[in-house]
Amino acid sequence: MKIEHIAIWVKDLEMMRNFYEKYFNAISGEQYHNSKKEFTSYFLAFDKGARLELMYKPSIFKALETNKELSGLAHFAISVGSKERVDSLTEQLRNDGFTVAGNPRTTGDGYYESVVLDPEANRIEITI
């Protein structure tokens, strides 16, 4: 298994994308925008290792006024290799008493994933 990507909430999506491109030689994918959810993101790739997802959603920063836990790291993703493994690991975690925050599905940006919470409620996306 490997960490597939790390995601962080940002206030200025373009400024942050430019920062990682300029200083860390990141290569940005195309902007993804879901107008229904008011969500916009970029995936940034590096020469080696995990990708970085920069995410923007106006309501996140409004929520920060009452919940400081939403800033910074939003989730991380672990690639397990197949849809079948996503499904089976999700069920194993559910059966072992962990919270499944999102059942296995194909997302609007093409990922097959589920979302589970670790013992301290950090979000983990289990992906192909």
Image: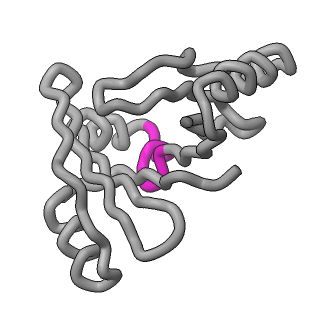
Image position, residue 79 (x, y; %): 60, 44
Image position, residue 81 (x, y; %): 62, 39
Residue at figure coordinates x 59%, y 25% from the top left: 83
The quadrant the C terminus occupies is top right
Q: 1 left or right of 26?
A: right
Q: 44 left or right of 69?
A: left
Q: Is residue 43 above or below residue 99?
A: below
Q: Is residue 14 above or below residue 21?
A: above
Q: Which residues are magenta?
A: 67-74
The reply to whether the magenta stretch includes residue 53 is: no
Q: Nearer the viewer, residue 108 or 8?
A: 108
Q: Is residue 24 above or below residue 58?
A: below
Residue at figure coordinates x 51%, y 62% from the top left: 50
Residue at figure coordinates x 27%, y 37% from the top left: 62
Image position, residue 120 (x, y; %): 72, 39
Residue 119 sits in quarter? top right
Q: Residue furthest right?
A: 96
The reply to whether the magenta stretch includes residue 71 is: yes
Colour pattern of the rendering: one colour
Q: 64 left or right of 56?
A: right
Image position, residue 28 (x, y; %): 24, 62
Residue 66 sits in quarter? top left
